[in-house]
Image (cartoon, rainbow, N blue to C red):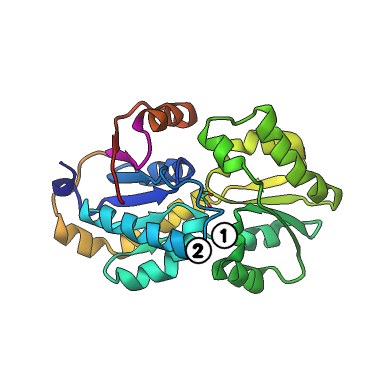
Amino acid sequence: MISQAISRSIGVFDSGVGGLSVLRAIRQELPDNTVIYLADQAHVPYGSRSLEEVRRFSEVITRYLVDQGAGMIVVACNTASAAALHFLREKFPGIPFVGMEPAVKPAAEQTQSGVVGILATPATFQGALYASVVERFASGVILLQDTCPGLVGQIEAGDLDGPRSRRILEEALAPMLAQDIDTIVLGCTHYPFVIPLIQNIAGPGVRVIDPAPAVARQVRRVLEANEARFSQANPAATDSQQVYYYTTGEPTRFQSILKQLTGESAPVAHISLE
Ligand code: DGL
């Protein structure tokens, strides 16, 4: 079914439901493109794994999405982007990729206090991508980092404002707030789903940056730059948007969290990528 639909379609993946925050923005920006969303919930969380292991998962997933007809890939996961974006571009030279990187640049431009908090996974902080954005954009700005241990798991379980998620975030943010941060960068795609909780803890004076809208605009630019190739491959692709959901985990679990996070009820298929 899927393979005949699409060469203009967009493959989107994450370790779990975090990439839905990016998918939401992509659907607003590009309401006509078919999207294939893959959640690698058999391996979530990625953030505490080695970069090498996450790279391996990312390669297998990308191959699967391309086999399903995806004409471009959005790595809707900061951790997988840190581990694999460069590698994937080399491995799949015909496929355009859009990845995530912590939004240090807009944060550094906007901060008044000169102190910015960054929430991301340990693997993201270890990657060369993070080191590169810090080096390029953060001079003169103090960056305070925290890995929010356990928060990805809480969000996967649908705990967006319970006591455990609150405690994790309070522990992360208290030292940052004590040092006068006025901007928080969400360097993990799961975290936009707890923005209300973050804002509640940090107060209205702190700006929280969700990179998803900027990433969706980049997806549009990349699609437009490749338009000729896509239309040639499938000139009749004018259908209204379809989104296909896959998980390597438990489909009913994904389905219920999808409903909770986005309000959408949709079929979800299980796939095994071992
Ligand atoms: N959503 C992911 C990210 O942006 C991965 C979180 C995880 O699996 O640890 O980093």
Judge whether residue 260 can be spotted in this image: yes
The disc label shown at residue 68, or none: none
Looking at the rendered structure, which numbered label has been put on residue 51? Answer: 2
Q: Is residue 242 magenta?
A: yes
- Asked whether, in this view, residue 70 is left or right of residue 50, the answer is left
Q: Amino acid under label 2?
A: Leu
The percent coordinates of residue 200 (x first, y second) are 72, 33
Q: Quadrant of residue 90?
A: bottom left
Image height of 169 relative to 78, above or below: above
Magenta part of the chain: 241-251
Residue at the spot x=79%, y=60% of the render? 114
Residue 41 horizontal side relative to residue 166, left or right? left
Determine crowd level at label 2: few under 14, some 14-19, many 20+ residues with C-alpha closer than 10 A: many
Q: Residue at x 77, y 70 (%)?
A: 140
Image spot of residue 173 (x, y percent): 76, 45
Which residue is found at the position 44% from the left and 65% from the top?
84
Work out whether residue 120 or residue 133 is closer to the camera in this orientation and state it.
120
- Secondary structure beneath label 2: helix
Q: CA distance from mark 2 to mark 1?
A: 6 Å
Callout 1: CB less than 8 Å from ligand 1: yes
Q: Between 45 and 180, which is closer to the camera in this rendering?
A: 45
Residue 229: give x, y in percent of width and height. 21, 64
The residue singled out by tag 1 in the image is: 123
Please state which amino acid type lies under the numbered disc 1: Ala
Question: Decide: marks 2, 1 in contact (CB < 8 A)?
Answer: yes
Which comes before the other along the chain, label 2 or label 1?
Answer: 2
Query: Where residue 24 appears, x then y in whole percent?
Result: 44, 40
